[in-house]
Image (tube, rainbow, N blue to C red):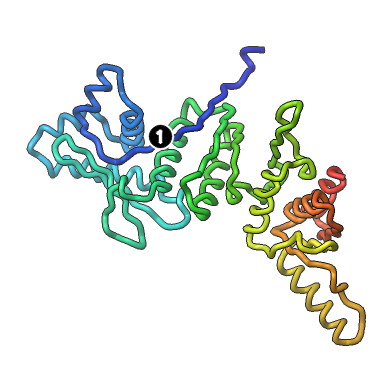
Amino acid sequence: MVNHLPTFIYMSDYRTFTGAAQLDQVKQRKDRQQPNDEDETLLMIMELSGLDLDEEVRKGNLSDREQRQYDLDDGSATLTRTISDRWKQRRYEVQFRADGQLFYTFVKDERDPSLIRLEERSKGFQWFFSFDLMFMYESQGTFENCVILLDEPGLHLHPDAQSDLLKRMEEYARNNTLIYTTHLPFMIDLRQPDRIRVLSETAQGTLVTDDLTQSQPEAKLVLEAALGMSGRTSYLIAQRNLVVEGVDDYWVLTEISNLLIRSGEEGLPEDVFLTPAGGASEAAYIATFMVGQKLDVVVLLDSDRAGDDARDALVKSG
Protein backbone atom coordinates (compact mmCIF):
# COMPACT_ATOMS: atom_id res chain seq x y z
CA MET A 1 0.00 0.00 0.00
CA VAL A 2 2.78 2.41 0.90
CA ASN A 3 4.38 1.92 -2.51
CA HIS A 4 1.13 3.00 -4.16
CA LEU A 5 0.68 6.17 -2.10
CA PRO A 6 1.25 9.30 -4.23
CA THR A 7 3.62 12.06 -3.27
CA PHE A 8 1.82 15.03 -1.72
CA ILE A 9 3.27 18.49 -2.29
CA TYR A 10 1.84 21.34 -0.23
CA MET A 11 2.57 24.97 -1.06
CA SER A 12 1.32 27.98 0.84
CA ASP A 13 4.25 30.34 0.26
CA TYR A 14 5.58 31.01 -3.22
CA ARG A 15 9.15 32.06 -3.87
CA THR A 16 9.71 35.16 -5.94
CA PHE A 17 12.90 36.06 -7.78
CA THR A 18 13.86 39.71 -7.56
CA GLY A 19 15.87 39.51 -10.78
CA ALA A 20 19.25 40.75 -9.58
CA ALA A 21 21.98 38.73 -7.86
CA GLN A 22 25.69 38.80 -7.05
CA LEU A 23 26.77 35.62 -8.83
CA ASP A 24 29.99 34.96 -6.92
CA GLN A 25 28.10 35.17 -3.63
CA VAL A 26 25.43 32.80 -4.93
CA LYS A 27 28.20 30.35 -5.94
CA GLN A 28 29.78 30.57 -2.48
CA ARG A 29 26.48 29.72 -0.78
CA LYS A 30 25.85 26.93 -3.28
CA ASP A 31 29.32 25.42 -2.73
CA ARG A 32 28.71 25.50 1.04
CA GLN A 33 25.35 23.80 0.33
CA GLN A 34 23.60 26.74 1.98
CA PRO A 35 21.68 28.43 -0.87
CA ASN A 36 18.74 30.60 0.16
CA ASP A 37 15.35 30.62 -1.57
CA GLU A 38 16.32 33.38 -4.02
CA ASP A 39 19.51 31.49 -4.91
CA GLU A 40 17.53 28.36 -5.72
CA THR A 41 15.09 30.31 -7.86
CA LEU A 42 17.98 31.98 -9.72
CA LEU A 43 19.67 28.61 -10.33
CA MET A 44 16.39 27.25 -11.66
CA ILE A 45 15.93 30.19 -14.06
CA MET A 46 19.53 29.90 -15.26
CA GLU A 47 19.08 26.18 -15.93
CA LEU A 48 15.88 26.79 -17.89
CA SER A 49 17.81 29.40 -19.91
CA GLY A 50 20.76 27.09 -20.59
CA LEU A 51 23.13 29.15 -18.43
CA ASP A 52 25.70 27.66 -16.02
CA LEU A 53 26.46 29.45 -12.75
CA ASP A 54 30.13 28.43 -12.57
CA GLU A 55 30.70 29.55 -16.16
CA GLU A 56 29.00 32.88 -15.58
CA VAL A 57 31.09 33.50 -12.46
CA ARG A 58 34.24 32.72 -14.45
CA LYS A 59 33.19 35.00 -17.32
CA GLY A 60 32.45 37.76 -14.82
CA ASN A 61 36.18 38.02 -14.12
CA LEU A 62 37.16 38.22 -17.81
CA SER A 63 37.54 41.35 -19.91
CA ASP A 64 35.65 39.97 -22.95
CA ARG A 65 32.20 41.38 -22.19
CA GLU A 66 30.95 41.12 -25.78
CA GLN A 67 31.15 37.32 -25.96
CA ARG A 68 29.58 37.07 -22.52
CA GLN A 69 26.62 39.19 -23.63
CA TYR A 70 26.15 36.94 -26.67
CA ASP A 71 25.79 34.00 -24.27
CA LEU A 72 23.35 35.93 -22.08
CA ASP A 73 21.32 36.94 -25.14
CA ASP A 74 21.12 33.29 -26.17
CA GLY A 75 19.87 32.39 -22.68
CA SER A 76 17.37 35.25 -22.83
CA ALA A 77 15.98 33.99 -26.14
CA THR A 78 15.71 30.44 -24.80
CA LEU A 79 13.66 31.52 -21.78
CA THR A 80 11.53 33.95 -23.83
CA ARG A 81 10.56 31.16 -26.24
CA THR A 82 9.60 29.00 -23.28
CA ILE A 83 7.30 31.55 -21.66
CA SER A 84 6.02 33.35 -24.76
CA ASP A 85 2.55 31.75 -24.75
CA ARG A 86 2.02 31.68 -21.00
CA TRP A 87 0.67 35.20 -20.45
CA LYS A 88 -2.23 35.92 -22.80
CA GLN A 89 -2.62 39.56 -21.72
CA ARG A 90 0.51 40.61 -23.63
CA ARG A 91 3.73 39.14 -24.98
CA TYR A 92 6.76 39.45 -22.72
CA GLU A 93 10.45 39.24 -23.52
CA VAL A 94 13.17 38.42 -20.98
CA GLN A 95 16.65 39.89 -21.29
CA PHE A 96 19.67 39.13 -19.10
CA ARG A 97 22.48 41.61 -18.46
CA ALA A 98 25.62 41.35 -16.35
CA ASP A 99 28.22 43.76 -15.01
CA GLY A 100 31.09 41.76 -13.56
CA GLN A 101 29.50 39.48 -10.98
CA LEU A 102 26.26 41.47 -10.84
CA PHE A 103 23.48 39.73 -12.77
CA TYR A 104 20.27 41.50 -13.87
CA THR A 105 16.96 40.30 -15.31
CA PHE A 106 14.93 42.72 -17.43
CA VAL A 107 11.44 42.21 -18.83
CA LYS A 108 9.83 44.21 -21.62
CA ASP A 109 6.45 43.77 -23.30
CA GLU A 110 4.82 44.59 -26.61
CA ARG A 111 3.11 47.71 -25.24
CA ASP A 112 6.23 49.21 -23.71
CA PRO A 113 9.54 48.36 -25.44
CA SER A 114 11.64 49.85 -22.63
CA LEU A 115 13.56 47.39 -20.44
CA ILE A 116 12.21 47.21 -16.88
CA ARG A 117 13.99 45.29 -14.13
CA LEU A 118 11.98 42.33 -12.90
CA GLU A 119 11.85 43.66 -9.33
CA GLU A 120 10.25 46.88 -10.65
CA ARG A 121 7.40 44.94 -12.28
CA SER A 122 4.18 44.48 -10.35
CA LYS A 123 4.21 42.07 -7.44
CA GLY A 124 1.62 39.99 -9.27
CA PHE A 125 3.84 39.65 -12.34
CA GLN A 126 6.87 38.74 -10.20
CA TRP A 127 4.79 36.11 -8.43
CA PHE A 128 3.42 34.67 -11.67
CA PHE A 129 6.89 34.67 -13.26
CA SER A 130 8.54 32.75 -10.41
CA PHE A 131 5.57 30.49 -9.67
CA ASP A 132 5.07 29.43 -13.27
CA LEU A 133 8.74 28.85 -13.99
CA MET A 134 9.09 26.80 -10.81
CA PHE A 135 6.23 24.53 -11.86
CA MET A 136 7.60 24.24 -15.38
CA TYR A 137 11.01 23.28 -13.98
CA GLU A 138 9.82 20.91 -11.29
CA SER A 139 7.25 19.18 -13.46
CA GLN A 140 10.16 17.55 -15.27
CA GLY A 141 10.95 15.69 -12.09
CA THR A 142 9.47 16.26 -8.65
CA PHE A 143 6.05 17.57 -9.70
CA GLU A 144 4.93 14.56 -11.72
CA ASN A 145 2.31 11.99 -10.73
CA CYS A 146 1.81 13.93 -7.50
CA VAL A 147 -1.07 15.40 -5.56
CA ILE A 148 -0.36 19.16 -5.54
CA LEU A 149 -2.05 21.19 -2.80
CA LEU A 150 -2.04 24.98 -3.23
CA ASP A 151 -3.26 27.41 -0.60
CA GLU A 152 -4.73 30.62 -2.06
CA PRO A 153 -2.75 30.88 -5.33
CA GLY A 154 -3.06 34.11 -7.29
CA LEU A 155 -3.62 36.47 -4.36
CA HIS A 156 -1.36 39.14 -5.91
CA LEU A 157 -2.82 38.87 -9.41
CA HIS A 158 -5.49 41.05 -10.97
CA PRO A 159 -8.56 39.31 -12.47
CA ASP A 160 -7.21 38.89 -16.02
CA ALA A 161 -4.00 37.38 -14.69
CA GLN A 162 -6.00 35.08 -12.40
CA SER A 163 -7.79 33.85 -15.53
CA ASP A 164 -4.40 33.15 -17.11
CA LEU A 165 -3.35 31.30 -13.96
CA LEU A 166 -6.41 29.06 -14.21
CA LYS A 167 -5.35 28.10 -17.74
CA ARG A 168 -1.80 27.40 -16.55
CA MET A 169 -3.13 25.26 -13.70
CA GLU A 170 -4.81 23.06 -16.31
CA GLU A 171 -1.29 22.32 -17.53
CA TYR A 172 -0.03 21.67 -14.01
CA ALA A 173 -2.83 19.14 -13.54
CA ARG A 174 -2.13 17.34 -16.82
CA ASN A 175 0.24 14.86 -15.13
CA ASN A 176 -0.81 15.50 -11.55
CA THR A 177 -3.84 15.83 -9.33
CA LEU A 178 -4.21 19.47 -8.29
CA ILE A 179 -6.34 20.79 -5.43
CA TYR A 180 -6.38 24.45 -4.41
CA THR A 181 -8.30 26.59 -1.95
CA THR A 182 -9.46 30.10 -2.76
CA HIS A 183 -11.67 32.96 -1.63
CA LEU A 184 -11.17 34.75 -4.97
CA PRO A 185 -14.23 34.81 -7.25
CA PHE A 186 -12.08 34.88 -10.40
CA MET A 187 -10.21 31.77 -9.27
CA ILE A 188 -13.44 29.73 -9.43
CA ASP A 189 -13.59 28.08 -12.83
CA LEU A 190 -17.27 28.09 -13.76
CA ARG A 191 -16.47 26.27 -17.00
CA GLN A 192 -15.90 23.17 -14.85
CA PRO A 193 -18.50 23.45 -12.07
CA ASP A 194 -18.31 19.72 -11.34
CA ARG A 195 -14.83 20.33 -9.92
CA ILE A 196 -16.01 22.85 -7.32
CA ARG A 197 -16.34 21.78 -3.70
CA VAL A 198 -17.54 23.91 -0.80
CA LEU A 199 -15.92 23.68 2.65
CA SER A 200 -18.14 24.37 5.64
CA GLU A 201 -17.30 24.37 9.34
CA THR A 202 -19.72 22.25 11.37
CA ALA A 203 -19.92 20.99 14.94
CA GLN A 204 -18.67 17.63 13.65
CA GLY A 205 -15.70 19.16 11.81
CA THR A 206 -15.06 20.45 8.30
CA LEU A 207 -17.60 19.31 5.72
CA VAL A 208 -16.58 19.03 2.06
CA THR A 209 -19.51 18.89 -0.31
CA ASP A 210 -20.67 19.67 -3.82
CA ASP A 211 -24.13 20.51 -2.46
CA LEU A 212 -24.34 24.30 -2.77
CA THR A 213 -27.43 24.41 -0.60
CA GLN A 214 -25.28 23.35 2.35
CA SER A 215 -22.74 26.14 1.96
CA GLN A 216 -22.31 28.75 4.66
CA PRO A 217 -22.83 32.50 4.07
CA GLU A 218 -19.11 33.16 3.47
CA ALA A 219 -18.90 30.50 0.75
CA LYS A 220 -22.18 31.63 -0.79
CA LEU A 221 -20.85 35.19 -1.02
CA VAL A 222 -17.78 34.03 -2.97
CA LEU A 223 -19.91 31.87 -5.29
CA GLU A 224 -22.40 34.69 -5.84
CA ALA A 225 -19.55 37.02 -6.72
CA ALA A 226 -18.05 34.47 -9.13
CA LEU A 227 -21.36 33.97 -10.89
CA GLY A 228 -22.08 37.69 -11.00
CA MET A 229 -18.62 38.56 -12.36
CA SER A 230 -18.57 35.97 -15.11
CA GLY A 231 -20.03 38.33 -17.71
CA ARG A 232 -23.71 37.58 -17.17
CA THR A 233 -26.35 39.75 -15.63
CA SER A 234 -27.06 39.77 -11.92
CA TYR A 235 -29.65 37.42 -10.52
CA LEU A 236 -31.08 36.35 -7.14
CA ILE A 237 -33.38 39.38 -7.25
CA ALA A 238 -36.63 37.66 -8.25
CA GLN A 239 -38.67 34.86 -6.74
CA ARG A 240 -39.35 33.26 -10.12
CA ASN A 241 -36.44 32.70 -12.51
CA LEU A 242 -35.74 31.24 -15.92
CA VAL A 243 -32.10 30.29 -16.55
CA VAL A 244 -30.92 29.77 -20.13
CA GLU A 245 -27.60 28.55 -21.49
CA GLY A 246 -26.34 31.77 -23.07
CA VAL A 247 -26.86 35.34 -24.17
CA ASP A 248 -28.21 34.23 -27.57
CA ASP A 249 -30.99 32.28 -25.85
CA TYR A 250 -31.66 35.31 -23.66
CA TRP A 251 -32.10 37.68 -26.63
CA VAL A 252 -34.15 35.27 -28.74
CA LEU A 253 -36.59 34.51 -25.91
CA THR A 254 -36.82 38.17 -24.89
CA GLU A 255 -37.57 39.34 -28.44
CA ILE A 256 -40.10 36.57 -29.09
CA SER A 257 -41.82 37.45 -25.81
CA ASN A 258 -41.89 41.15 -26.73
CA LEU A 259 -43.25 40.35 -30.19
CA LEU A 260 -46.05 38.23 -28.70
CA ILE A 261 -46.95 40.93 -26.19
CA ARG A 262 -47.03 43.62 -28.92
CA SER A 263 -49.33 41.34 -30.92
CA GLY A 264 -51.73 41.02 -28.00
CA GLU A 265 -50.61 37.49 -27.19
CA GLU A 266 -49.17 36.10 -23.97
CA GLY A 267 -45.41 36.47 -23.44
CA LEU A 268 -43.14 35.76 -20.51
CA PRO A 269 -44.74 36.75 -17.18
CA GLU A 270 -43.47 40.08 -15.89
CA ASP A 271 -42.34 38.56 -12.60
CA VAL A 272 -40.08 35.98 -14.27
CA PHE A 273 -36.44 37.08 -14.33
CA LEU A 274 -34.39 35.75 -17.24
CA THR A 275 -30.74 34.88 -16.52
CA PRO A 276 -28.24 33.87 -19.25
CA ALA A 277 -25.38 31.60 -18.19
CA GLY A 278 -22.08 30.70 -19.80
CA GLY A 279 -23.13 27.30 -21.09
CA ALA A 280 -25.17 24.33 -19.96
CA SER A 281 -22.98 23.38 -16.98
CA GLU A 282 -23.02 26.92 -15.60
CA ALA A 283 -26.79 27.14 -16.12
CA ALA A 284 -27.19 24.05 -13.93
CA TYR A 285 -24.79 25.55 -11.38
CA ILE A 286 -26.72 28.84 -11.19
CA ALA A 287 -30.03 26.99 -10.90
CA THR A 288 -28.72 24.83 -8.07
CA PHE A 289 -27.57 27.95 -6.28
CA MET A 290 -30.98 29.57 -6.73
CA VAL A 291 -32.66 26.49 -5.27
CA GLY A 292 -30.38 26.87 -2.27
CA GLN A 293 -31.62 30.44 -1.91
CA LYS A 294 -35.25 29.15 -1.80
CA LEU A 295 -36.04 30.69 -5.20
CA ASP A 296 -38.26 29.19 -7.92
CA VAL A 297 -36.29 28.33 -11.02
CA VAL A 298 -36.78 26.70 -14.42
CA VAL A 299 -33.75 25.80 -16.56
CA LEU A 300 -33.96 25.72 -20.36
CA LEU A 301 -31.28 23.45 -21.85
CA ASP A 302 -30.36 22.43 -25.38
CA SER A 303 -31.02 18.82 -26.35
CA ASP A 304 -27.34 18.03 -26.87
CA ARG A 305 -24.70 16.19 -24.83
CA ALA A 306 -23.88 19.22 -22.68
CA GLY A 307 -27.57 19.83 -22.02
CA ASP A 308 -28.14 16.19 -21.09
CA ASP A 309 -25.17 16.25 -18.69
CA ALA A 310 -26.46 19.45 -17.08
CA ARG A 311 -29.94 17.93 -16.72
CA ASP A 312 -28.46 14.85 -15.05
CA ALA A 313 -26.45 17.05 -12.68
CA LEU A 314 -29.59 18.95 -11.71
CA VAL A 315 -31.53 15.74 -11.08
CA LYS A 316 -28.65 14.37 -9.01
CA SER A 317 -28.50 17.51 -6.87
CA GLY A 318 -32.22 17.28 -6.20
Furthest residue in direction top, as rendered: 2
Q: Please report the residue visible at 25 percent of the width from the left and 19 percent of the height from the top.
A: 31
The residue carrying mark 1 is: 15
Which sits in the foreground, 4 or 25? 25
**Number of disc labels:** 1
Relative vertical location of residue 304 with respect to residue 75 in this rendering, above or below: below
Residue 175 placement, left or right of 42: right
Furthest residue in direction left, as rendered: 63
Relative vertical location of residue 92 with respect to residue 253 in this rendering, above or below: above
Which sits in the foreground, 280 or 123? 123
Relative vertical location of residue 129 with respect to residue 280 in this rendering, above or below: above
Q: Please report the residue visible at 51 percent of the width from the left and 30 percent of the height from the top.
A: 11
Q: Please report the residue visible at 28 percent of the width from the left and 34 percent of the height from the top.
A: 51
Furthest residue in direction front, as rendered: 203
Q: Callout 1, which amino acid? A: Arg
Q: Secondary structure at mark 1?
A: loop
Residue 282, x across and y down, in percent: 73, 54
Which sits in the foreground, 282 or 81? 282
Residue 292, x across and y down, in percent: 81, 49
The quarter of the rendered structure image containing the N terminus is top right
Kindly indicate the quadrant of the structure image that contains residue 194.
top right
The quarter of the rendered structure image containing the C terminus is top right
Residue 203, x across and y down, in percent: 75, 28
Residue 131, x across and y down, in percent: 44, 38
Q: Please report the residue visible at 63 percent of the width from the left and 12 percent of the height from the top.
A: 2
Furthest residue in direction right, as rendered: 265
How dense is the environment of label 1, judged by Cα within 10 Å: few (below 14), some, or many (20 and up)? some
Residue 301 placement, left or right of 39: right
